[in-house]
Image (tube, rainbow, N blue to C red):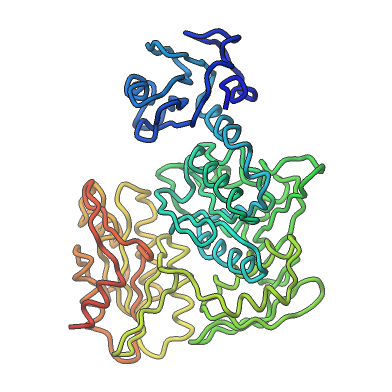
Amino acid sequence: MRLSELLSRVLVNSLENITEENLDMLDIKGVAQDTRKTKQGFLFVCIEGYTVDGHKFVKQAVEEGAIAIVAQKPIETDVPVIYVKDTNKALPQLAAAFYDYPSEDLKMYGVTGTNGKTTVTHMIEHILSEDGRKTGLIGTLYNRVGDRVIETVNTTPEAVTLQGLFAEMRDEGVRDCVMEVSSHALYEGRTWGVDFDVAVFTNLSQDHLDFHKTMDNYFLAKSLLFSQLGSSYAGKEKFAVINIDDEYGERLVPLTSATIVSYGCKGVGDVQAANIVTKVDGTHFDLLVNGASYPVRLPQIGHFNVYNVLAAVGATIVKGIAPETIVSALNTFTGVRGRMQLVPNVQEKTIIVDFAHTPDGLENVLDTLNKIKTGKIITVVGSGGDRDKTKRPKMAQAAAKLSDYVIFTSDNPRTEDPQAIIDDMVAGLAFDDFETEVDRRTAIQKALAAADENDIILIAGKGHETYQIIGTIKYDFDDVKVIEEFLAK
């Protein structure tokens, strides 16, 4: 693509080492913000991040093959430089232009919220697939183009990777793309230029306050998905699917011009659930939509999963999928790794691995388990290091309130002292039936050894993760494998 065409939607302040007339002479083969991804013929964009400043890597980018640079502050180089006011703003504009605005050719579903994003995106994707559509998926566990799985680093990739994924989907015949949208990505502008059709809000509770500082800031970041849906009623119709039972859902309503589809379990909403019954083999309820009632037999357990279903129903019904098709798909949804995952074992113990890593998420899981337990609930849980410290005692209180016995252990301690994190959790805890064990493997083994036949063992906090970060090193660690190895002995 000619550099002049690539810059057509970018506000350029000045040029260096090239004239405006000569912009047509440069053929750009790709766009990158990372020197490791820069190749011959690329345009390199200098991003000033929290820990790394791309302006300091211009020489390396040129050595890797960059033939032009986009910068927001003075740099020294012999290749052409395009100066802009804000490279963070320019990057998604350039990425979208380079790939010819691929999200405009897809039906885009964006899901945001504290809990439930991964499950809701997988439910939506499953419903779309059952309707015969070729789908794409972007999220915490992996990215997927049709049946092809691609490893992921962030829940929501940076702008160039994201637009590249959309282009792959478009070129391979994908019709619908479902993606998790994190608050970090929204705040940092990674999703600028993404033409969402449907935005879904699951819920909001305390998380990521190490980054956002306050709940109001956290909510503001989440709300950007809805306020950025656009206010034009020409072309694509936009929908906002909102959990109206959540206080923050109510606050979202006036912040979007899109058509709102509300959902809830408390007698209010366009999509509702009634007569909810949680059983060991799943959750049964009546789905109320468009004046009709449909019985749902969900293989997963938990009131929170009912909310996940309602979010998925709202997102798919507005895109023309029949309620009967949706209900049929839900009955065959097998769940998501690390989300209320039942670990099969020959001893027939009830062992559940779940990603619950917030006070609200942990409380929701334990509340569900209390409704089906016939013995004790033994919980293993920790809290991450270098993250929001204020949620640590709240995590411990949630575990203590709804468990019969708790083993507090390490999550991903990162650069903090693991014992200090546990001490933060249990400080002032008015609960005696607990112990602390820094080593997560030992903590899991202790819980399994202590459990009787009718007990439930919940291993919480890491879910799908197959690693543990101690210091700055990422070690192999999989809760499910630790469980299987111990039981095999």
Look at 63% across and 75% down and name the residue there.
329
Q: Position of residue 30 (x, y in %)?
A: 49, 31
Quarter of the figure with the N terminus: top right
Look at 51% across and 9% down and name the residue there.
18
Q: Is residue 377 above or below residue 245?
A: below
Look at 23% across and 66% down and name the residue there.
440
Residue 447 seen in the figure: yes
Q: Image check: 219 left or right of 412? A: right
Q: Position of residue 119 (x, y in %)?
A: 52, 65
Give the camera-side residue of 280 and 299: 299
Q: Is residue 64 above or below residue 215?
A: above
Give the camera-side residue of 394 and 302: 302
Look at 36% across and 68% down and name the residue there.
460
Residue 248 seen in the figure: no
Residue 403, image quadrant? bottom left
Q: Image check: 148 left or right of 315? A: left
Q: Image check: 89 left or right of 132? A: left
